[in-house]
Amino acid sequence: MMRQYELVERVRKYNPNVDEDLLNRAYVYAMKAHGQQTRASGDPYFSHPLEVAAILTDLKLDDATIVAAVLHDTIEDTETTREEIDRLFGEQIGKLVDGLTKIEKLDLVSKQARQGENFRKLLLAVADDVRVLLVKLADRLHNMRTLHFVPQDKRARISQETLDIYAPLAGRMGMQRLREELEGLAFRHLMPEAHQAIEQRLHELRAKNGRIIKRIEDELAREFSERGIEAAVTGRQKTAYSVWRKMERKSISFEQLSDIFGFRIIVGTLEDCYRALGVIHSKWPNVPGRFKDYISTPKQNDYRSIHTTVIGPGHQRVELQIRTPEMHEIARFGIAAHALYKDATGDEGREELAKESRAYRWLQETLDLLAHGDSPEEFLEHTRLELFQDQVFCFTPKGGLIALPRGGTPIDFAYAVHTKLGDSAVGAKINGRVAPVLSQLQNGDEVEIIRADGHVPPPAWEAAVVTGKARAAIRRATREAVRQQYAGLGRQIVERAFERAGRAYADDKLRAALTRLARPSIDDVLAAVGRGEIYSGDVVKAVYPDFIEDRKAAQAPPAPGEPGWFGVKANANLVFKAPGAAGEGDAGAIPIRGLRGDAPVRFAPVGGAVPGDRIVGIFTPGEGITIYPIQSPSLTAFDDQPERWLDVRWDIDPDARAFFPSRIVATAINEPGTLGALATLIGETGANIDNISFNAHSPDFREMTFDLEVADLKHLTDVLAKLRASPLVSKVERVIG
């Protein structure tokens, strides 16, 4: 276990102004607080926070973060309180420890929903101070280093969670070294046989190719020296997990891997990076398609480097990375390499860090998704998509750089620029040419978004976009549009209810009754009425408690052709009129747009309706409109609900032959060939048989029910006449339910 003075010395190596007294006090306090507690390994529990602190000293973090690491389990596992931490060590450290306490139980999750919810808690805890995330990642790393002491079932679950969340999150924060160790430890516990086999092969390869690696290092160093470039060249082997992932992704064997070894070249300046690249490409041929310049276009985790692959000695592929010492620091430590992270506790500090660090900016954008009402599972899944996917880099017309997951679309691009731009997007130009808004973008594309005010993104876009921000925004816009439509419908219904009651309606009066209706706002009440969750009469009673309802029969609907009629795209053969919309033009139209376009329109389940029938529409909130013939006995069920009735008339295009549902019942002689004969007669009229059912009427007769599709009432009448003329038919009639 690390001694007290050793902790101070580790910090002093990179921070000569270390607050030695603060570290000593934290060390002694945590040791006493944890007392005789032990870990699964049998070691004193206090050894765990010390090891977490040691990991963070490798990242060269500030004194407050190191102290928070030493104290991070005290509130959770001892009698210590937040108030006591604040009093002894200051409010800043208390806030860090409290943030870690809120997410301490993340290791105990099992189900996806719990995992998603705890992931949200993790990100919410780092909203105020990114150092909470750094301590949590170090905490997870030490837990993974000692995971072999944990029971096997927990071991597999914790390892999978590490691969799903913590390792990708460390990578997204630019902490590559920590990510690689997390992946390696999780891989070892999840797939021990695969891990052992790959490690054995890598060991054999290292022994076999050791001379080649040294030769490449020496040749590169000599070439750079001759051209006056100071460079440090080191060879390295890929990790077992990265090798396994590549084998899985490309479905290849170990022998088919061609770039297991890589070389890192550290040069003094940015200019030297490109000079070194020229030296390498002049010495060995490069592999086409394997050059990436992450200096001019950094990754979203702030990573900057030049990557190239060449055909080196022995005709082997050699992967090289060229960077400066500053770039190397960020590649190793990620966001922890930024000095500003220490002060990113207020709005101003967070804003400055977001400008300096793309990784922190991504973290803040991810936190914004938490306010959009996604379920925990959806939030976790959407964030996973962005954690795991490779990126493409696209440009705005003004030259701004936008990074998207591979497979990103112009809609993802628009939402990455600004939520309002995504909501209003109706088209796109890619490299100056009009293209579908769901096209897949490629590296280097210039994207211009065509927008229209008042546009609502179609719900179908949600399944086509790849970023969590776009999906959450589309879902939110859809919910809001539907809510407004229901609120509009609810307002029409409520105003009619007040009118029938002979009482005056006003928003102020309804606002005063919100508590009686248990709704926070007028719009919530109106939307609930539109969805059928609140009965309109209850709203009248809430506003006027002395009101006694006396329901009146519905008045005869005005004749078609007057103002107030409107169409529904879901059925172009019908037009509707809002209840009470007389002489007021389009203002009376009820907004009945549904979740995925216009409200669905269907015909009565028994017998349907055909052009020529007098018809009425019954509106069911959340379901749509059902069309009934005016003589349908089913309409009696709605006699006391006049607010649901819609005037409907046919709007048939004579040039478009459309068919409509109808049902007939024929009583026919029960003998061979009868069904075939009747079906032939129906077919001769041009009607279509959709379904047939039978009922035994008597030994000599059979009752047959035909569900037909006919053009209009005259067509149906022709069918009935044709069947009645047949000697096989005793009786035939239309069914209206």
Image (cartoon, grey):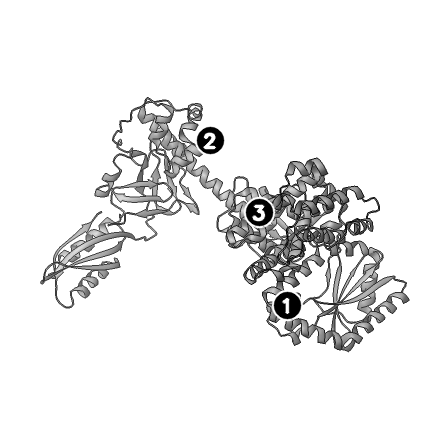
Q: Which mark is drawn over residue 120?
A: 3
Compare residues 33 and 150 and report the one nearer the observer.
Answer: 33
At which x and y percent is residue 323?
79, 59
Amino acid type at circle 2 is: Ser
Residue 292: image quadrant is bottom right
Label 2, secondary structure: give it: loop
Residue nearest the viewer, comparing 530 with 439: 530
Residue 521 is marked as 2
Q: Which residue is mark 1?
A: 246
Residue at 18% across / 62% down in the picture? 678
Of pointers 2 and 1, the one earlier in the residue sequence: 1
Q: Nearer the viewer, residue 450 or 603?
A: 603
Tell me the kind of residue under disc 3: Arg
Distance from disc 2 to disc 1, alpha carbons, whole Å, reads 54 Å
Q: Is residue 172 visible?
A: no
**What is the spatial separation of the Cα atoms under label 3 and label 1, in whole angstroms?**
30 Å
